[in-house]
Amino acid sequence: MNHPILLYDGVCYFCNGLVRFALRRDKERRLRFASLQSAAGQALLHEYDLPDGEIDSALFIENGHVYTRSTCALRALRYLRFPWPLLYGLIIVPPFIRDAIYDVVARNRYDWFGKMDACPLPPPEQREQFLS
């Protein structure tokens, strides 16, 4: 099965919290994860011809397509258990509005939530969902 992949900022406390949130709610274990800083994350950036070092928060890869910013977040929510997929309905909000809100959080996430020195390792029972 070709699993959708969420690439996230592995040193961001907020991003790591969202990954843990998704792991707890992805009961069917459909999502896969990789930090942007990892070898797997860097390989995916290269594979999809994306500039490493210029990605400032998260990417969602699904069926060979790369989604960014608010669309990334909304598409990932569709894989979580109810009621979270209902938020995908926000896709009807024009992207310039959704992305403006997303950009404020992305730009301030280190100031608001902090930054780690290194990417934490996932717990053993969830490691199969992380690309190595």
Image (cartoon, grey):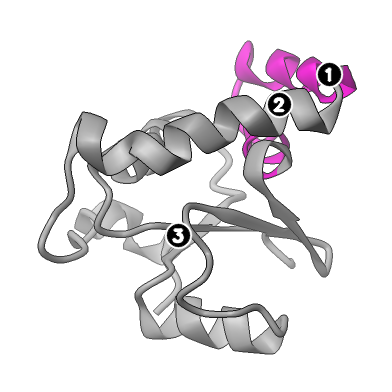
> Residues at badges 3 and 1 in contact (C-beta under 8 Å)?
no
Q: Secondary structure at mark 2?
A: helix
Which residue is disc 3 drawn over?
129
Q: Residue at x 33, y 53 (%)?
A: 126
Magenta region includes residue 41: no
Q: Residue at x 67, y 61 (%)?
A: 3
Residue 36 location, x and y as percent? 43, 69
- Residue 103, compared with residue 52, is above or below; it is above
Residue 107 location, x and y as percent? 42, 42
Amino acid tagged 3: Gln
Residue 51 location, x and y as percent? 60, 80
Which residue is disc 1 drawn over?
93
Asked if residue 11 lies left or right of residue 63, the reply is left
Gap between marks 3 and 2 measured at Cα: 28 Å
Magenta region includes residue 89: yes
Amino acid tagged 1: Val
Residue 68 location, x and y as percent? 68, 51
Q: Nearer the viewer, residue 118 or 82?
A: 118
Q: Residue at x 81, y 32 (%)?
A: 95
Q: Nearer the viewer, residue 105 or 44?
A: 105
Gap between marks 3 and 1 measured at Cα: 31 Å
Q: Nearer the viewer, residue 103 or 61?
A: 103
Which residue is disc 2 drawn over?
98
Q: Nearer the viewer, residue 72 or 63?
A: 72
* Bounds of the magenta segment: 72-92
Q: Residue at x 64, y 44 (%)?
A: 69
Q: Secondary structure at mark 1?
A: loop
Q: Evaluate whether residue 27 shows in this view.
A: no
**Nearest-to-viewer mark from 3 and 1:** 1
Asked if residue 111 lies left or right of residue 48, the reply is left
